[in-house]
Image (cartoon, rainbow, N blue to C red):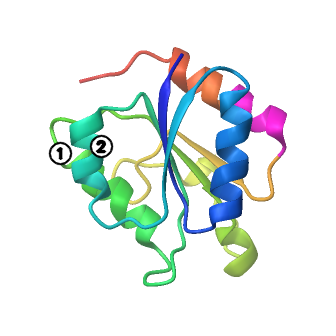
Amino acid sequence: MARIIIVDDDVEIAEHTSAILKTKGHETTLVHTTENVAALLIQNKPDLLILDVMFPDNPVAGFDLARQIRRHREINDLPILLLTGVNQEFPMGFSDADIDTDWMPIQHFIEKPFKSNDLLKSVSKLLATPRKK
């Protein structure tokens, strides 16, 4: 099926997300920091990135990484699913309505905690969407 990289500092959530995706035959790689992820993505060329927002060293690291990815020609069309609990920490009401090419350049947003079915539907939809160069 698809190759998916999950970037989340919460090891349990990353492993849980991976286990759900593996039930559908997807291959997953888990990363627990945003450091050097762009290089990893360029090297491995996954089909999808599942990305958290908040990391211990930077509460907006996921947003920063998404913007960094869009600046790299080799991976700027990579679909990004933001899987985050940012709204629990900062009650700003982030949602798909906030997606834009400059500030939050992702394809979809799912709030933690999430339902397995919602994750699988979102992943299927993003993988079925043709990538644009």
Q: Main secondary structure of the magenta part?
A: helix
* Residue 12 locus on image (x, y percent): 71, 61
Query: In the rendered image, which residue does mark 2 sit on?
Result: 41
Identify the disc placed on residue 46: none
Q: Amino acid at mark 2?
A: Leu
Quadrant where the N terminus sits is: top right
**Relative image position of residue 54 (x, y in whole percent):** 54, 73
Where on the picture, by quarter, is residue 62? bottom left
Q: On the rendered structure, is 125 left or right of 89?
A: left
Q: Which residues are magenta?
A: 115-121
Q: Are marks 2 and 1 in contact (CB under 8 Å)?
A: yes
Q: Is residue 3 within the magenta segment?
A: no
Q: Is residue 76 visible?
A: no
103 on left or right of 75: right
Identify the amino acid type marked 1: His
Left or right for 16, reference 132: right
Tell me the element at label 1: loop
Residue at x 63% of width, y 64% of height:
11
Which of the numbered marks, if any, corresponds to residue 72? 1
First of labels 2, 1 by sequence position: 2
Where residue 117 appears, x then y in whole percent? 82, 32
Is residue 126 something that shows in the picture?
A: yes
Q: Quadrant of the C terminus?
A: top left
Whether residue 119 is in magenta: the answer is: yes
Rendered position, 28 above or below 6? above
Going 49% across and 35% down the picture, which residue do you hit?
A: 4
Residue 84 versus residue 21: which sits nearer the camera?
A: 21
- Residues under labels 2 and 1: Cα distance? 10 Å
For residue 105, side relative to residue 21 (left or right): left
